Amino acid sequence: MTTALRVLTQNLYLGADLSLLFGASAQALPTLAGRAWDAVRATDFPRRAALLANLIAAEPPDLIGLQEAALWQVGSAGRVAYDFAELLRAALRQRGVEYAPVVLTPGFSGAARTAAGEEVRLTDREVVLARTASTALGFENGQGGTFAARLSVAAGGRRVSVPRAWAAVDVRAHGALFRFVTTHLEAYAAAVREAQLRELLAGPLATQLPTLLVGDLNGGPGPLLSAGFRDAGPAGGPLIDFVLYRGPWTPLAVSLIEPRRRGAWASDHPGVLAVLALPLAEDTG
């Protein structure tokens, strides 16, 4: 007897290319920060969340690993302008599918003042969402952290460290116990990214439990495959987003959540939706 689990990895896209700020002088930073903030508003996450919710609600996963689940705040009081995780949850709720956050881990957080004098703060986050209708699932040992290996860039005349994060939780399903991990690895430096992979293997992936790792790896999963993980897909791509498994899982199906439809787009990354079966505890003795 087995239990089938439907899991999704989805990068939400911050809304702007922040690498444009790398190397900016103190004089240029307010103008570039204003352009980035204009891009965030123009890419309109509430609209994108509705598009994503339509795609996700068609085949609702039991567990979702979100990357770039941004929290954008403005003003000295930190008024929330966009909470990507909550906006997506609200859009899914409107479509009759309810999700609850199980683990939320902040990564990079930084603020800048635009040329218009507006203070804008970004907090990047990795989030595990669980479908509340999946009543057979229980959760314990929720944890999260940032990697010691970090990109360091110049911005505004100073060095800025850019931490990336991971989130993990142990999941009980019909007597079976497994670990679910989501992460977003460094995009702009391969050496940093490879060091983060080693940290994953020595940290949340250092378990004897059957394990699922989902996320935006920003590269191939080579070291993870060497450590016993297998790729559940994806079907024909993408190259950087993966659902990986270790242990007695049986992949049953995998598909892409294509975020571009009829000229509209929900994210700059396709999501990967996988269905896997895990033997129940009584089957393994």
Image (tube, grey):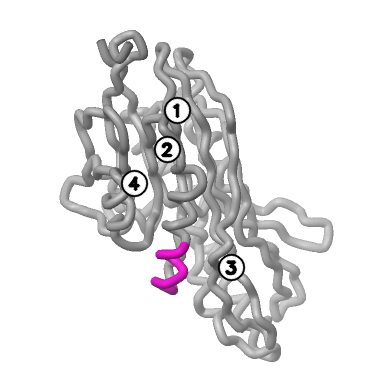
Q: Which residues are magenta?
A: 189-195
SS at mark 1 in the image: loop
Q: Say if mark 1 contacts mark 2, CB within 8 Å.
A: yes
For residue 271, which numbered disc appears in the image? 4
Q: CA distance from mark 3 to mark 1?
A: 36 Å
Tell me if mark 2 has few (under 14), some (14-19) or many (20+) residues whose alpha carbon lies within 10 angstroms of its own: many
Q: Say if mark 3 contacts mark 4, CB within 8 Å.
A: no
Residue type (three-letter) at the residue carrying disc 2? Ala
Residue extending farthest to the left is 236
Instruction: Note whether residue 99 is visible.
Output: yes
Please tell me whether mark 3 or mark 4 is closer to you in this view: 3
Q: Identify the mark nearer the N-term, 3 or 2.
A: 2
Residue carrying label 1 = 95
Q: Dominant secondary structure of the magenta stretch?
A: helix
Q: Residue 100: x, y in percent?
A: 56, 29
Q: Identify the mark nearer the N-term, 4 or 2.
A: 2
